[in-house]
């Protein structure tokens, strides 16, 4: 019975994703030759058409990648791939902890290898075609190697500790695994600004006196204490621009992409940063962390129950080994198939994110100038080739930010 539920949800997932992707492509194409009135004076028809073509190209690649991932999921589950891996590693490795870590590592490696061609295509074909990619093959390889090594350094101890907790804590293991997961995430948040991010990018103190003065005054008005203002060499990899704040406590800092500083003036940069500080003022980051940790607790409780049900394994094409722990098998199966069942919560998560964005926009309009934020957003939409005419259903389902037209109208009219 569980097999039928899994197949039904997977087919519904495939159908829904495909239908929404097709809607997006058709809708964007249908509005390709007319710039919305709100942007007609600032964005040229040529730029609008470029954004439409970029959006459609991304949608196609994303759809193909998802179909490959769905096939891989079936290969791991109902077609016996995970069963074969589990038996093969069980014969080759006697140490139980190493065997289970090898199982998890093999699945992650397989998924990474399958996804690698899509990453290469995006960087060197899709992004390059529209003038965004600045990554050289050498830098791409270096980034990939660093990412793998970082995953091993951080991920291997995490996996080992979770497996040990599952083996040693009895029925209460989901609670202790949750404690481990929360502690790990907080550790990464603490390390990211000063240890992890510098592995991939260079960060230099902001040296523009005008912007520094504006930002410091804005931060003071907003009650935001920071350890510094930094510029990141984002242009080393992409022409896209952004700004963000990261870390907490003494490591909290504001980071500007150099591409953003090159494109926006001081007033616009201040408005963009005010938007980011709006997230801080409304405690969006803290709220999202709490929700994330709460969901992790719920999912681990569900996993704790499912891991004791034989039908959970057999329904997904795997026969658990007798006399040996199947903790890694349960973890892999759960995290492989959970997205199939949780996909339908995507619109709710997107709506909550868009609500936060509206609140951050409203806060920025109070602290700075709504017109300055509008001007900055229009430039960013143009530079990043963001479509101004997304399909309404696609936007409602996936978009973490409000549609451009709706967002601009709300800023201009305050409604």
Image (tube, rainbow, N blue to C red):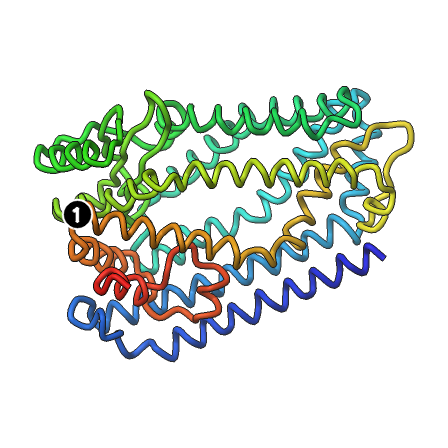
The residue furthest left is 210
Tell me which residue sits at (77%, 39%) in the image.
85
Crowding near pointer 1: few (<14 within 10 Å), some, many (20+)?
Answer: some
- Residue in the foreground of this view, choosing between 201 and 373: 373
Percent coordinates x, y for residue 280 in the rendering:
33, 38
What residue is disc 1 on?
368
Is 113 situated left or right of 373 in this image? right
Indicate whether 126 appears above or below 91: below
Is 171 situated left or right of 229 in this image? right
Q: Quadrant of the N terminus?
A: bottom right
Is 106 situated left or right of 313 in this image? left
Indicate whether 144 appears above or below 312: above
Percent coordinates x, y for residue 12 in the rendering:
67, 65
Percent coordinates x, y for residue 351 in the rendering:
46, 57
Is 223 situated left or right of 150 in this image? left
Q: Quadrant of residue 197?
A: top left
Q: Quadrant of residue 58?
A: bottom left
Percent coordinates x, y for residue 137 in the rendering:
39, 43
Helix, strand or loop for disc 1: loop
Q: Quadrant of the C terminus?
A: bottom left
Tell me which residue sits at (28%, 52%) in the image.
361
Q: How many marks?
A: 1
Indicate whether 94 appears above or below 384: above
Tell me which residue sits at (24%, 56%) in the image.
377
Tell me which residue sits at (26%, 74%) in the image.
36
């Amino acid at each position: 019975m569980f097999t039928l539920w899994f197949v039904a949800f997977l087919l519904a997932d495939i159908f829904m994703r495909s239908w929404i992707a097709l809607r997006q492509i058709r809708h964007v194409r249908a509005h390709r030759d007319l710039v919305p009135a709100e942007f007609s004076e600032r964005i040229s028809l040529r730029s609008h058409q470029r954004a439409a073509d970029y959006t459609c190209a991304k949608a196609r690649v994303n759809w193909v990648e998802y179909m490959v991932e769905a096939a891989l999921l079936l290969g791991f589950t109902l077609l016996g791939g995970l069963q074969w891996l589990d038996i093969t590693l069980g014969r080759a490795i006697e140490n139980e902890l190493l065997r289970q870590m090898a199982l998890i590592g093999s699945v992650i490696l397989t998924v990474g290898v399958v996804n690698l061609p899509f990453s290469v295509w995006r960087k060197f074909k899709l992004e390059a075609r529209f003038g965004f990619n600045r990554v050289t093959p050498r830098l791409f390889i270096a980034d990939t190697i660093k990412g793998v090594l970082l995953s091993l350094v951080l991920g291997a101890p995490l996996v080992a500790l979770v497996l040990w907790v599952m083996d040693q804590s009895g029925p209460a293991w989901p609670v202790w695994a949750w404690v481990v997961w929360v502690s790990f995430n907080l550790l990464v948040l603490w390390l990211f600004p000063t240890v992890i991010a510098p592995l991939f990018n260079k960060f230099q103190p902001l040296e523009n006196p005008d912007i520094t003065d504006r930002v410091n005054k804005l931060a003071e008005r907003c009650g935001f204490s920071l350890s510094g203002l930094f510029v990141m060499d984002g242009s080393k990899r992409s022409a896209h621009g952004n700004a963000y704040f990261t870390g907490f406590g003494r490591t909290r800092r504001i980071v500007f992409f150099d591409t953003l500083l090159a494109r926006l003036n001081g007033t616009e940069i201040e408005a963009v940063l005010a938007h980011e500080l709006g997230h801080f003022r409304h405690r969006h980051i803290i709220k999202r962390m709490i929700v994330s940790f709460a969901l992790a607790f719920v999912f681990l409780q569900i996993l704790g129950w499912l891991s004791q049900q034989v039908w959970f394994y057999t329904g997904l094409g795997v026969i658990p080994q007798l006399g040996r722990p199947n903790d890694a098998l349960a973890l892999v199966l759960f995290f492989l198939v959970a997205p199939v069942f949780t996909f339908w919560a995507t619109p709710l998560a997107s709506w909550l994110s868009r609500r936060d964005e509206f609140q951050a926009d409203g806060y920025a309009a109070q602290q700075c100038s709504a017109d300055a934020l509008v001007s900055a957003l229009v430039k960013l939409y143009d530079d990043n080739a963001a479509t101004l005419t997304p399909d309404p259903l696609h936007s409602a389902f996936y978009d973490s930010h409000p549609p451009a037209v709706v967002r601009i109208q709300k800023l201009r009219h305050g409604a």
